[in-house]
Amino acid sequence: MIAGSQCEPAATDRNDPISLPLPHCPVHATDHSDLPESSFFKERRAPALPTPAEIRAVGKKLGDSRATDFDRPSPVMFPSLGMIVKYGANVTVVEAQTQMVVYKHLKGQVPVPEVFEWTEDQRFIYMPLIEGETLQERWSGMDEDERQDVCEELKHMAKAWRSLQEDRYDSSIGKQPLNEIFLGSHSNLAGPLEGPNAVQQFQDGCGMEIKEEVPIVFTHDDFVSPDILLTPGPNPKVAAVIDWGQAGWYPAYWEYCKARRVKLNPELFNDAIQEEWHMKYLPLILDPMDNELIYFPWLYFVLSKGI
């Protein structure tokens, strides 16, 4: 089954494979979800979280040119509260719910920001403000040993989320369509697709001639350097993997192909650095896919669909 992600995690024995179930997400009487067990409320950092109106006002006061952008305004930081708020029409409730699930199941394996609260009013996600810079910002100043160490960390993290298992007792995983930007203008392909031939159905719909048998794995689907935060100073470590808005259950090759294809800000990652990242370092993190059998058919789909 190919589908987007879900909200409530399953109770599992730590010795068993981790299985993510179909979420029975309640229909809230209000447009937000309080998480009283989150560290924000336990530590009593403030009597209440900033309201959506207050967050928008702070963004405007700071003179952010994107503060009035309805779809993708810049996240707003509240340093005194140790908090950052991501919001906008392009932020989904499923992103918050997915982040909560991954945070709970992979705590200690993958540093994922905790979710303090989320709202549906233009979709606000409240989470910790993590000190650090993106890998994209740090990369050019890192020596080879530092680069290799970070890649080794990321390899184990990616392996952890790709080892998550779908709930064997419920085949639909929330019946959420994939929130993949490359499928944005082709919602009919986003699923969810169910059954034993889900991957083949998906590939046939996309026009991808991939003959290999391919499993479905949990996929971050935006695994690029701006979404990897590193600790400050020398010998940086991975502080967080962020932006889980496109995550879900995809064919196993999707993570590598997408990460190899996405182009980044040339001011921070010029063409030469990006080529080196894709060809030398990305294969240290994710198993590379064969060009002829997998990557080129996938790339043909992306280019031919005009997305």
Image (cartoon, helix red, strand yellow):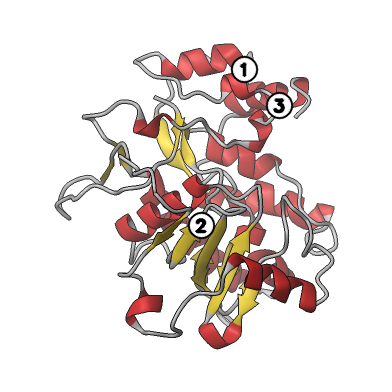
Q: Which SS class for mark 1?
A: helix
Cα distance between the residues tagged 1 and 3 = 12 Å
Three-letter code, disc 2: Thr
Q: CA distance from mark 2 to mark 1?
A: 34 Å
Pointers 1 and 3 in contact (C-beta within 8 Å): no
The location of residue 69, given as percent across then percent down, is 78, 56
For residue 171, side relative to residue 285 (left or right): left
Secondary structure category for the residue under label 2? strand
Q: Tag 3: residue type?
A: Ser
The quarter in which the N terminus is drawn is top left
What crowding class fits label 2: few (fewer than 14 Cα within 10 Å), some (14-19), or many (20 or more)? many
Residue ID at (67%, 47%): 279
Q: Earlier in the sequence, mark 2 or mark 1?
A: 2
Q: Which residue is denoted by mark 2 in the rendering?
A: 119
> Which label is found at residue 44?
none
Amino acid, disc 1: Cys
User: Please, which residue is most extreme toward the bottom here?
Assistant: 80
Q: Nearer the viewer, residue 278 or 77?
A: 77
Residue 212 seen in render: no
Callout count? 3
Residue indicated by mark 1: 206
Looking at this view, is 160 or 194 the one in front?
194
- Sequence-wise, which precedes: disc 3 or disc 2? 2
Q: Percent x, y for residue 305?
A: 74, 21
Q: Is residue 142 visible?
A: yes
Comparing labels 1 and 3, the label whose residue is closer to the camera: 3
Q: Which residue is mark 3?
A: 185
Q: Residues within 10 Å of mark 1 (few under 14, many from 20)?
A: many
Q: Is residue 291 above or below residue 206?
A: below
